[in-house]
Structures are given as C-alpha cells and as structure tokens.
Image (cartoon, coloured by chain):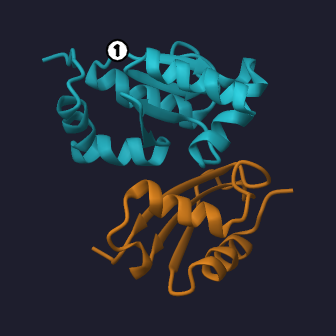
Amino acid sequence: MPMAADDIIALIKQGIPDAQVEMQDMAGDGDHWAATVVSPAFAGKTKIQQHQMVYGALGGRMGGVLHALKLTTMAQKP
Amino acid sequence: MTEVFDRIRDEIAKNDVLLFMKGTPVFPQCGFSAATVECLSELGVKFASVNILVDPEIRQGIKEFSQWPTIPQLYVKGEFIGGCDIVREMFETGELEQMFKDKGVTLAKAA
C-alpha cells in the first residue's frame, strides 16, 4: 500500500516542525514521490545529515512502504 | 551483523570509488541506481560496484552501516558521499567533479 502525500508531509513536519514541504507525484501513480523540504533546522548541516533528518522523521518507512522519494533539502528558499 | 560490516569495510577499503546499487552498471535494475551510474559515467570515473540484489546480507547491512535507508550509495575513498539525489545534485552543480579531483580520483572525461 503506497503512502499518500499528506501522510508523508505530516510525518516530515512531525519530525521537523518548522519544515515547509512540497510534494510532487513523479510518475502519476501515487507511489513515486519527489519532496522538497525547506527548514532552518538544516542550516550548517551537510546534505547527508539533512537527508538523514528527513529519513529519521519518516521513521523507517523509507526503503519500506515508501520506496521512491526523491529528496531535495535546503535551509531556505533560494 | 559485525561480519557483514567487515565485508562492507573490506569492499570500501579495496575500491577508491564504490557504488552499492541494484543491478550492475551495464544492467541497472532501478531508476535511481541507473541515474547514479549515469552521473559517474558522464564524468568518466572508473568505479567498482556491488549488486545488493544478489546479496541479501549486504542489502540489509549497508543500510545500517551507513545509517542510510536507500540504495544506491556512493563511497569515495572510504567516505560516504550520498545516495542518488545527492550525487545527482552534486553532478549538476559541478561539486561531484570537484570532489573527485580533490580526492585525487582520475577522471577520463570525454572532451
């Protein structure tokens, strides 16, 4: 059972409260997502750490029920 | 789990540029793995790969080893660089090429 965009957003925001999350359905099948996550909490962190924070917020679902999530993270909007 | 960590460490130590992926560079079995291979090939980087689909122990072990839940995973000279999104982003900004140069990895980029 794929995850809905709203569920993914809710989890990310739960883990990173000030995050702004934009979701895009890459394949139109509700199962291959691209997420852009903007949060001041990312400031001063490496890309790996930023992505790990998002994966942490998803609590182990990444690579499981959520198999395709293209991530873009940034501390502030360009 | 320590035994599989040793195997992973050994592979990383043996290969300057190592990609844990689904499938092989010639026949990738996942779009994310294919995209990462493409970035490396584009730069002309010689790399070794581990097909995690044929090795369930490594498939699980590498995720815990790196604290990273997805495949592919790129290691350069022992350092975890990232997964597909990071590699692709670094490729687009030129950071990937710079990182290889900084680490003394030879690039055979077509002129």
For the point 74% across and 35% down, which residue is it?
B60
Where does the image place residue A75, in percent across and percent down from the top left?
Answer: 36, 74
Q: In which quarter of the image is residue B43?
A: top left
Outermost residue on the bottom side: it is A18
Q: Give the residue type that dot 1 points to.
A: Lys
Q: Quadrant of the N terminus of chain B?
A: top right
For the point 71% across and 31% down, which residue is it?
B2
Q: Is residue B10 above or below residue A25?
A: above
Q: Is residue B48 above or below residue B100?
A: above
Where does the image place residue B72, in percent across and percent down from the top left?
Answer: 56, 35
Considering the numbered disc 1 on the image, is that residue within a helix, a strand or a loop? loop
The reply, left or right, for residue B26 in relation to residue A2 is left
Q: What is the count of numbered marks?
A: 1
Q: In which quarter of the image is the C terminus of chain B?
A: top left
The reply, left or right, for residue B80 in relation to residue B96 is right
According to the picture, the residue beneath numbered tag 1 turns out to be B46
Q: What crowding class fits label 1: few (fewer than 14 Cα within 10 Å), some (14-19), or many (20 or more)?
A: some
For the point 45% across and 21% down, which residue is it?
B13
- Image colour for chain A is orange
Q: Is residue A23 above or below residue B85?
A: below
Where does the image place residue B5, in percent across and percent down from the top left?
Answer: 64, 30
- Which chain appears cyan? B
